[in-house]
Image (cartoon, rainbow, N blue to C red):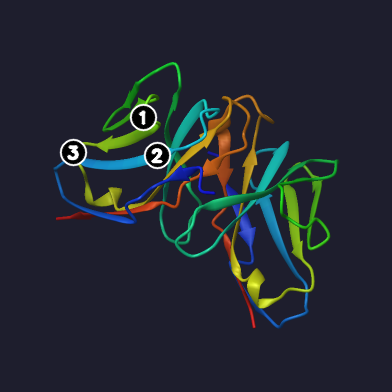
Amino acid sequence: GAVVSQHPSRVICKSGTSVKIECRSLDFQATTMFWYRQFPKQSLMLMATSNEGSKATYEQGVEKDKFLINHASLTLSTLTVTSAHPEDSSFYICSASKTGGINTDTQYFGPGTRLTVL
Amino acid sequence: DQQVKQNSPSLSVQEGRISILNCDYTNSMFDYFLWYKKYPAEGPTFLISISSIKDKNEDGRFTVFLNKSAKHLSLHIVPSQPGDSAVYFCAASPIQGAQKLVFGQGTRLTINP
């Protein structure tokens, strides 16, 4: 199988603080990881694509200084929401790809992290 | 601008009958389409895909139909089972292997015993 975990599953923080979310591929090496966010009753929106050892590629409209992504190893990527505000409250979900782009359907998703900013 | 749309937020179907989930897209550059299934507190899992050179792909109880001229695809599940109750997302990609997926809003399918 191909299992992707996320930690924490749920986090509540105060406005102005930073929150780090971890995404791990448990039984495979992920050359590429993706970060999505989902607002209630809306679709998953791709925020950024990260490749191990290089800078993440952010989608249009996503602030790279606000959402820091680090993909330091082939099994771990982190998303840090800096100086979080209530409008950042959302469901953040990561996915990981084994092959780095050959087959689109080899994206394996984590269970998601529910962030609530008070 | 919602490039991939699932206009039905929910669908309820009797066990054993056919479930039909619909998806429309606006970007003619989309070339590859996928369906994902999501249970609560879990990540989406890949179900079935179709490339634009085909109009049908079948895998067991699941069949995806693509109508390029109408920019419409549908997922048929037959016969529907209680374990099929989940949220179903359609997704599109400009080219197969591009990996940048654009998702629809999802449709919650409930299979009634």
Position in image of residue A3 (x %, y %):
57, 46
Query: Is A21 placed left or right of B54 in the picture?
Result: right
Residue B70: image tag: 1
Which chain is mark 1 on? B
Above or below, B89 against A83 in this view is above
- Looking at the picture, tell me which residue is in the foreground, A106 or B50: B50
Above or below, A68 against A73 in this view is below
Is the residue marked by circle 2 packed among few (<14), some (14-19), or many (20+) residues within 10 Å?
Answer: many
**Disc nearer the start of the sequence (1/2):** 2
Tell me the kind of residue under disc 3.
Pro
Residue B24: image tag: 2
> Which quarter of the picture shows residue A22?
bottom right
Is the residue marked by circle 3 packed among few (<14), some (14-19), or many (20+) residues within 10 Å?
Answer: some
> Which quarter of the picture shows residue B78?
top left
Q: What's the distance in space between the residues labelled 3 and 2, CA to CA?
A: 24 Å
Q: Residue at point 50% right, 27% down? A: B32
Which residue, given by chain and number where applicable, does mark 3 sit on? Answer: B79
Q: Residue at point 60% right, 49% down? A: A4
Residue A27 can be seen, yes or no: no
Which chain is mark 3 on? B
Closer to viewer: mark 1 or mark 2? 1
Tell me the kind of residue under disc 2.
Asp
Query: Is B14 placed left or right of B25 in the picture?
Result: left
